[in-house]
Image (cartoon, rainbow, N blue to C red):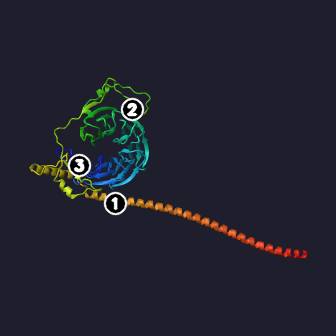
Amino acid sequence: MIWNLAPKARAFRFIGHHDGITGVQFSPSGNLVATSSKDRTVRLWTPTMKGKSSIFKAHTAAVRSVAFSHDGHRLVTASDDKSVKVWSVYRQCFVYSLNQHTNWVRCARFSPDGRLVASCSDDHSVRLWDTSNKHCVNCFSGYGGPATWVEFNSSGTCIASSGTDSTLKIWDLRTNKLIQHYQVHSAAINGFSFHPSNKYLISASSDNTVKILDLLEGRLIYTLHGHKGAVTTVAFSRTGEFFSSGGVDAQVLMWRTNFDTKNYHELLQRQSRWSTSGSSPYLTDIHPKIRPRPHQRPSATQISAVTDTRSVDPTVVEMGQPVHRATSRLEDSNWDRSVHRTGKTAGNQTVSSKTDRGRREEEEEEEEEEERRKEMKPPDAPYAQQFHLESTLGLICQQLDILTQTVSVLEERLTLTEDKLKDCLQHQATILKDMRGSQGGSQGGSQEGSQRSKSLGTTVFPFHYNCG
């Protein structure tokens, strides 16, 4: 679903997947939405009234996560088939696969410069991949359970990873060493997000809470209560002004980022500071290295969500069609026309027939849709031509690569054939030479024998005759 935060705006429900959706992300430009699903597919949606989507198929098991590269040209997906796959957004095709995990892969993300891919798996490891040569350049292990989430910070110098053992670790990629270690949740951490300033990090856990960490101070500063079940996902907005959380209680909560409005430093000063011995010299073990006093309450400020009772649930417009057949495009002009005539509430109840009030609402909706179309207008003609030209050139380069590989294979086979032919000819020449030598020797021996027999006959017979 795509929600419009403007007052009296509609929400849009996009239908197309056959099974539960495990991941969703906007492209950097905001013109596309990528989703991953347990139906083993990835879909690329255009968030317009037509509800069109392109389907990507290459995984053989459930797809757990999907993410855009920072330039918006590629997608990376993680799957239960133990692989990480990279896709081209413009060509809408599979590019290559990364296979070294030995169990389900939970999450995969591009680095900000696009040169690295980080992935985490149920094999208790986090792997770092080089996108240029497709090799695994580093492997971080040491988790007490499956690794659930991985993310780069905005500068690309660090990665953070979480696990079902309720730990969250931050690694410095310049030294490949663990620099921070948090254990503030009482259950598995399902996801987290860096603030754009890299000063804060928010985490979502199965203990029904969202926690906010100050990465500069290395402390837990806030614990947020509001969900009535496990919190499955959390994310900052692009500017960092807001963040949202979603859980199994079917709620999406929107929070305002006002961390600096409360003075939590005084609360932190009341902590007892002591260090554990035997830690590695490079390891800044934030928890449980620094612990509160036994009779003191935790340092984090407890905050409960305030329910918004003023606004009502928005009208939900369903985009696309219920899936009855496998298709890569959800196109139906009749459905597009019916969208303008029919709205559905969050409980899938049909809106009443056209009345004066309904007509006014529809007029307002049409105006909002017009504004939405203006905001999401398609690319201009030069950009479209450039896009088609790039796509055509990409396909030509792909075909040339295939031809080059075919020619190289044929050259190798021709070289092998020539070598074998030379060996056969040399072997045949040796055999002929040996045969000629053996024939010449036999002929020479027969001639010498006949001459000897003749000479012996002339000398012997007279001898025998004389003796007789």
Residue 225 position (above or below residue 25): above
Question: Which of the two marks, 2 or 1, is nearer to us in this view?
Answer: 2
**Residue 47 visible:** yes
The residue that appears at 37% across and 50% down in the rendered structure is 85
Residue 371 position (above or below residue 184): below
Q: Label 1 to label 3, Cα distance in Å?
A: 33 Å
Image location (x, y in percent) of residue 365: 16, 50
Q: Which residue is mark 2?
A: 285
Q: Which residue is mark 3?
A: 13
Image location (x, y in percent) of residue 313: 18, 43
Residue situated furthest front in the rendering: 468
Question: Which of the two marks, 2 or 3, is nearer to us in this view?
Answer: 3
- Front position in the image: 422 or 454: 454
Kind of element beneath mark 1: helix
Q: Badge 2 local density, few (<14 within 10 Å), some, or many (20+)? A: many
The residue that appears at 42% across and 37% down in the rendered structure is 142
Q: Label 2 to label 1, Cα distance in Å?
A: 52 Å
Kind of element beneath mark 3: strand
Residue 417 position (above or below residue 446): above
Q: Which residue is mark 1?
A: 392
Locate the C terminus by quadrant: bottom right
- Mark 1 or mark 3: which comes first in sequence? 3
Residue type at the position of mark 3: Arg
Dividing the picture into quadrants, the one containing residue 291 is top left
Residue situated furthest left in the rendering: 356
Is residue 362 found left or right of 395 in the rendered image? left
- Mark 2 or mark 3: which comes first in sequence? 3
